[in-house]
Amino acid sequence: MESKVKKKVFIEGSISSSFIAEAIAKHSSKKDIGAHSIFLGQVRQDCIDGNQVAAIEYTAYQSMAEEQIHQIREAAFEKYPLTCLHIYHSLGRVDTGGICLFVFTSSKHRQAATEACTYLVERIKKEVAVWGKEIFENETYQWKQND
Amino acid sequence: MESKVKKKVFIEGSISSSFIAEAIAKHSSKKDIGAHSIFLGQVRQDCIDGNQVAAIEYTAYQSMAEEQIHQIREAAFEKYPLTCLHIYHSLGRVDTGGICLFVFTSSKHRQAATEACTYLVERIKKEVAVWGKEIFENETYQWKQND
Amino acid sequence: MQITLLVFGVLNDILPPQTMVLPAGADTHQLQQLLNERYPDLEKYQYVLAKNQQLIHQHQPINEGDEIALLPPFSGG
Amino acid sequence: MQITLLVFGVLNDILPPQTMVLPAGADTHQLQQLLNERYPDLEKYQYVLAKNQQLIHQHQPINEGDEIALLPPFSGG
């Protein structure tokens, strides 16, 4: 259990595939893990009123968001039998095609990892003090709205 | 849609984190993707009657298993609005801590990727002609049973 | 008394973050009224308040040095 | 007629994969009876049959050159 330490969450810019690979590789020494579930959010090139999204620029109320994510982590560890759990979110500009959210859960049996991952993604998107600004190719913008 | 081509599924030995990273990185050019869901199966060091598992050795009825996975892929593309979908399974020996199953789904919105990933893992474990042999530290073995 | 006002998301288009001086004994309701007078467009937007990094669920007294944040709906991920 | 018999998983502990000669007109039921006579331990195991890479749901005729596989419960992943 590593649920008691408040962990680094925010990463400047997009989350690289090599960062994700390292996170996966670190778990090969945890021999009680049987299943990992990973969610990756990727910035889409949406087209809104004829304007193409070029990037999303993320800002956070960082001290509050870190505490919120800490609470959500604790809740997930109480709710599901997890071995470990990692959450990373981008800050600043992430171009289309870049990864902006990385949620990674591990457990002995697959159900806990899978369900916890979905639970975390839903709560993070709804409850955490982060905002995305969709920057269009023509330099205009609009503030992103989550469903 | 890339559902019509029968794709390579089996990989000799464990699936490396760099292979997974490459698979993720390839999708950064697919600008209509907003969400990826990944499931990784990892070989656990279970202890059975005092014997520790050292590895699982996988065999498949390969021609049949490839056709089964092809059918499961087709079914997933019909059932969920996916952008793409990748399935890899190990053959041969995978030591504890190694990744033996990699299921990777991508979609515009997160629900399709997440639900399809779970659907695929369940069907693969139940329906595909693959067998695992748990090799213990003391060189004895037992045939793995899925729940 | 002096407080820090933080502004996030779309509300950055309406008002800047700022240090504000409020009458002693002011509460969050009075702060909102004051902001609505100075920035009439603010009333068009949905947002919640946080006091010292905690969401508040009903209006509360404000103290010297508090950090008050205006939070429009979150849109991370 | 000659067929190929494939054996997977735990059944490898009971019998080897092999080329078999069956009487003309034999079906999968007769094949199972023959295997049970030769390998009595086989009756202790649960398995299904595949004919030419297709699971069969009821007994079927066997033809020259068919590939018959004995499949215990799958345990991939």
Image (tube, coloured by chain):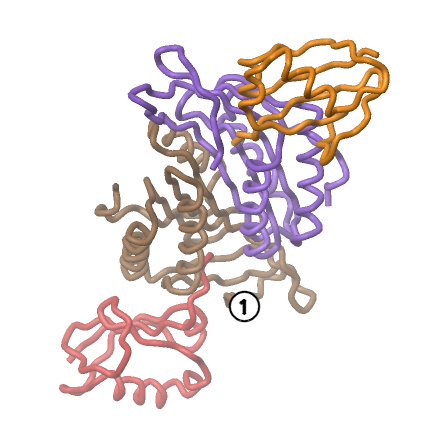
Chain colours: A brown, B purple, C red, D orange
Q: Secondary structure at mark 1?
A: strand
Label 1 belongs to which residue?
A: A142
**Residue D52 sits in which quadrant?**
top right
Q: Residue at x 39, y 47 (%)?
A: A11
Q: Is residue C63 above or below residue D29?
A: below
Q: Residues within 10 Å of mark 1 (few under 14, many from 20)?
A: some
The answer to whether D4 is drawn above or below residue A124 in the figure is above
Compared across the picture, whether C66 is left or right of D26 comes to: left
Image location of residue D65, percent across then percent down: 82, 15
Rendered residue at 68%/27% (across/down): D49
> In this rendering, does residue B25 appear at all?
no
Left or right: B145 in relation to B120: left
At 42% from the left edge and 56% from the top edge, which residue is drawn? Answer: A119
How far across and down, in percent of the image, does residue A21 sit? Answer: 45, 33
Horizontal and vertical percent position of residue C33: 31, 89
Q: Position of residue D4 (x, y in %)?
A: 74, 14
